[in-house]
Image (cartoon, rainbow, N blue to C red):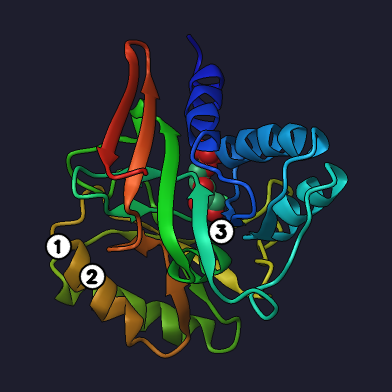
Amino acid sequence: MDADALKKQAAARALELVRPGMRLGLGTGSTAKHFVDLLGAKVAAGFSVLCVATSEVTQAQALSLGIPMSTLDETPELDLTVDGADEVDPELRLIKGGGAALLREKIVAAASARMVVIADDGKLVQRLGRFPLPIEVVPFGLEATRRAVVAAIATSGSTGELRLRERPDGSVLVTDGGHYILDAHLGTIAEPEKLALALNVVPGVVEHGLFIGLASGAILAGASGLTILGRIE
Ligand code: 5RP
C-alpha cells in the first residue's frame, strides 16, 4: 500500500475520535488534508463541529467543504487537534513544520486538550533529527539570528547545517506569519528538550518544530495495520 493510502487510513481512524459539537484544531499537510476531507463529508451529512485551522491552506480547504470555522480569539480552548508530523519518536516527541505551518500548529496544539498525530508509520523514528528541524525566524537580523541559532544548537550537543527554506522557484519561503524558516540538518538530535530550550531563548526565533509534551497520542498506519502510541481517546 502506498504512503498516501496509509495516511488516509490514519485520518479515518482519527475521524472516529470526533464527537458532535467538538471544537477541533485542523492540522496542515497531506495527512491532515485527508482528515479535513473526511470531516467535510461528515459535516455535509449534518454533523456539527467548530474548527480552527493551523494554516491558510487548511482554512481554505475547510471553508470550501463547508466546515464551520472559528479562530482562537473566538474559541480559545479546543477539545482535540488532529495533525500530521514529519517525525514521531516513541516518547511522542515530534518534528513538525515540513509544511511551514509550525507556528500556528504549535499554538493550536497548545490550546487543545488533546493533540492526536496521524501519519504513516515511516514517520516513526527511534531518534529525532533525520528530518531537518524547521526553525521559524523573523526576517529582521537574519544573519545575526542564524549565528545565534548555530550557537544554540552547539550548546545543546548537536551540529549541522542551516539552510534558509526556499520555494520551488528559488524565492525565499515566507510563512503565514510573515517569517522565514531555517531548516537545521542535524542528522540526529541527542537531547531534544535541551535543544528546544536553547532555541526558545534566541531573539529572532519565533518558534521551532520540536513539539515536546504536546501530543497525547499518535495513529500510525503501516502495511500490517494501525499502531497507536500513547492515548488517543
Ligand atoms: C506542516 C506539518 C505537517 O504536518 C508535516 O509536514 C507532515 O506533513 P505530511 O502529512 O504531508 O507528511 O508539520 O507544517
Q: How many marks can you see?
A: 3
Q: Quadrant of the C terminus?
A: top left
Q: Amino acid at mark 2?
A: Leu
Which residue occupies 78% across, 46% down?
A: 61
Q: Position of residue 191 (x, y in %)?
A: 14, 62
Residues at badges 2 and 1 in contact (C-beta under 8 Å)? yes
Residue 125 appears anywhere in the view: yes
Does residue 6 sit above or below 90 in this rendering? Answer: above
Q: Is residue 194 left or right of residue 120?
A: left
Q: Is residue 76 left or right of residue 126?
A: right
Q: Amino acid at mark 3?
A: Arg
Which residue occupies 64% across, 54% down?
A: 21
Task: Report how far apart the C-alphas of labels 2 and 3 lie in the structure.
Answer: 20 Å
> Residue at label 2?
195
Q: Position of residue 54 (x, y in %)?
A: 62, 60
Which residue occupies 42% across, 77% down?
A: 146
Q: Residue 1: give its label.
A: none
Q: Position of residue 206 (x, y in %)?
A: 49, 80
> Residue at label 3?
165
Q: Secondary structure at mark 2?
A: helix
Graded by Cα atoms within 10 Å as few (under 14), some (14 to 19) or many (20 or more), the crowding at tag 3 reads some
Question: 120 and 174: which one is in front?
Answer: 120
Q: Secondary structure at mark 1?
A: loop
Task: Report how far apart the C-alphas of labels 3 and 1 lie in the structure.
Answer: 24 Å
Q: Residue 191: give its label.
A: 1
Indicate the quadrant where residue 96 lies: bottom left
